Image (cartoon, rainbow, N blue to C red):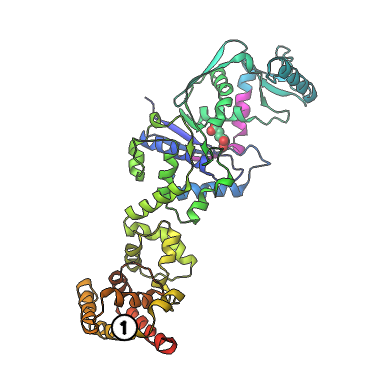
């Protein structure tokens, strides 16, 4: 088989949303799996609705998802000379013609067609007239009138269209600009695309496109139309179902690998496996396993999968993902080894990077703000003795490691007769300001001697100044 060449051709009329991103991912994965090529094409012929902002947003989202392209980005707006050439080819071979029917006349025909057969069709008035170009003339494709056009879809199976139901559609408007179905086909032919995976909202365009391929003497690509993504209420996914842009998920603290994994599972399966690394997806992704029923977007599942990916990723690989969230909170990070050890204490308990950054705050803040609950429960007079004793023990330690710390706590337990928990809770409140945190020894080790002792001393002072019990 020839080298697989796939493409992702977004229209830059908004941000990249879940459905579009899934299409991109499927095409990219398939190209990577088959050691083929993946091409990015920006379909910006609709100049009124296309914006540079959307183009940038699409690049940003693809980059975040880690989707790289081998060719492009091509911009349709820069390819009009090619489309013109192909329109001429069809005119020269008698497979397209000028039509001077007024829009009102065409509208009338469409109404009549609708009434007669339920199909709003152009009736072919100019088809055999051999008209020449005039100011108001459009160019129509001479479509097959009889027989059928069969879409052999690798996902949906064969879909048969009656040619009678199609009409001579416009391929160039009177101002010379080519129409959507035409440019897609010319691009796919000239870019050597042999595999087209896209949303099934494009099924109805495909018979027209197949006819164009045939008229241009080109081989058909493999088509696969993926069912739409639905919301939990089984209606088409829309803004109502939550944040829709891919980058919004980045900003909510999702890992690109987790989001990618979830997107793929919205329409592709491999037994009942849910968790896939990027490499595993590349290794296992085939078109046969794309399902025929719509994927249902479930934020809770995505969240659970994100937690799994955060857990599974080595802390040194999480650093670059967490950093933007820490910077946003104005924390200064000089030492990535320190950050790695911070992550090691939090990666089992954070569902998102936002949660992780919030939970990490006490590692970076100079002044610990005590939660009211922590003050009430643990920063009280009865905690003074164990805290003071612990400070003494810790000051004497050369090295902060688990064994040393355990010993220090043991000594305090023995001399106060208190259980570990009774000592650990005020220590936690002193070090983090909170009542819940990662394990106390872990925190102490990561914070290091200076910070720990200074925070414990501050807590002692706080209790002495404030405690009323
Ligand atoms: N530009 C089209 C879209 O964004 C895609 C066309 C295609 O895949 O053929 O829906």
Q: Is 412 placed left or right of 335 in the picture?
A: left
Q: Which image quadrant for residue 288?
A: top left
Category of crowding for the residue at label 1, using alpha-carbon neighbours closer than 10 angstroms: few (below 14), some (14–19), many (at least 20): many
Foreground of the two, 287 or 411: 411
**Camera-side residue: 291 or 435?**
435
Q: Residue at x 41, y 72 (%)?
A: 434
* Residue 147 horizontal/vertical position (percent): 57, 10
Query: Could you tell whether 405 is left or right of 262 in the image?
Result: left
Residue on which disc 1 sits:
387
The residue under the point 61% across, 26% down is 85
Would residue 391 be counted in the magenta stretch? no
**Residue 256 rendering spot, x and y as whole percentages:** 43, 50
Q: In this image, 76 relative to 432: left or right?
A: right
Looking at this view, name the residue that lies furthest to the top.
146
Q: Nearer the viewer, residue 74 or 438?
A: 438
- Magenta region, residue range: 69-87
Residue at 40% across / 89% down in the picture?
Answer: 464
What residue is shown at x 33% (from left), y 69% (from top)? 338
Quarter of the picture holding the C terminus: bottom left
Based on the picture, tell me whether residue 71 belongs to the magenta stretch.
yes
Q: Where is 261 relative to 100, above or below?
A: below
Q: Quadrant of residue 46?
A: top right
Task: Locate residue 339, reporting x and y percent.
Answer: 36, 66
């Amino acid at each position: 088989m020839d080298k697989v060449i796939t493409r992702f051709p977004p229209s830059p009329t908004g941000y990249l949303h879940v459905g579009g991103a899934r299409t991109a991912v499927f095409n990219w994965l398939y190209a990577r799996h088959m050691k083929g090529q993946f091409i990015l094409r920006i379909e910006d012929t609709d100049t009124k609705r296309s914006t540079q902002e959307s183009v940038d947003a699409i690049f940003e989202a693809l980059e975040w998802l880690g989707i790289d392209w081998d060719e492009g980005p091509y911009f349709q707006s820069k390819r009009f000379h090619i489309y013109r050439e192909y329109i001429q080819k069809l005119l020269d071979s008698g497979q397209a013609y000028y039509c001077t029917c007024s829009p009102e006349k065409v509208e009338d025909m469409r109404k009549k067609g609708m009434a007669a057969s339920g199909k709003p069709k152009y009736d072919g008035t100019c088809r055999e007239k051999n008209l020449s170009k005039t100011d108001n003339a459009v160019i129509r494709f001479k479509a097959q009138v009889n027989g059928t056009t069969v879409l052999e879809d690798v996902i949906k199976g064969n879909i048969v269209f009656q040619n009678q139901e199609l009409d001579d559609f416009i391929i160039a408007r009177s101002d010379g600009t080519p129409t959507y179905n035409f440019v897609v086909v010319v691009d796919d032919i000239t870019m050597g695309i042999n595999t087209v995976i896209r949303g099934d909202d494009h099924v109805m365009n495909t018979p027209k496109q197949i006819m164009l391929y045939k008229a241009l003497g080109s081989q058909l690509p493999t088509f696969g139309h993926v069912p739409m993504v639905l919301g939990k209420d089984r209606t088409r996914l829309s803004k109502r179902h939550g944040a829709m842009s891919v980058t919004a998920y980045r900003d909510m603290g999702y890992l690109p690998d987790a989001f990618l994994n979830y997107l793929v599972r919205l329409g592709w399966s491999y037994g009942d496996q849910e968790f896939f690394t990027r490499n595993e997806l590349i290794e296992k992704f085939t078109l046969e396993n794309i399902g025929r029923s719509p994927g249902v977007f479930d934020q809770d599942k995505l969240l659970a999968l994100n937690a799994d990916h955060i857990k599974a990723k080595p802390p040194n690989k999480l650093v670059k993902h967490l950093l933007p969230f820490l910077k946003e909170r104005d924390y200064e990070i000089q030492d990535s080894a320190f950050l790695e050890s911070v992550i090691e204490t939090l990666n089992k308990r954070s569902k998102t990077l936002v949660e992780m950054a919030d939970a990490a705050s006490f590692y970076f803040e100079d002044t610990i703000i005590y939660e009211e609950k922590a003050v009430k429960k643990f920063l009280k007079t009865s905690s003074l003795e164990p805290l003071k004793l612990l400070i003494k023990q810790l000051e004497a330690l050369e090295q902060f490691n688990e064994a040393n710390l355990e010993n220090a706590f043991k000594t305090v337990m023995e001399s106060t007769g208190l259980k570990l928990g009774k000592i650990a809770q005020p220590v936690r409140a002193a070090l983090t300001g909170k009542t819940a945190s990662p394990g106390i020894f872990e925190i102490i080790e990561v914070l290091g001697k200076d910070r720990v002792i200074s925070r414990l001393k501050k807590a002692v002072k706080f209790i002495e100044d404030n405690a009323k019990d």
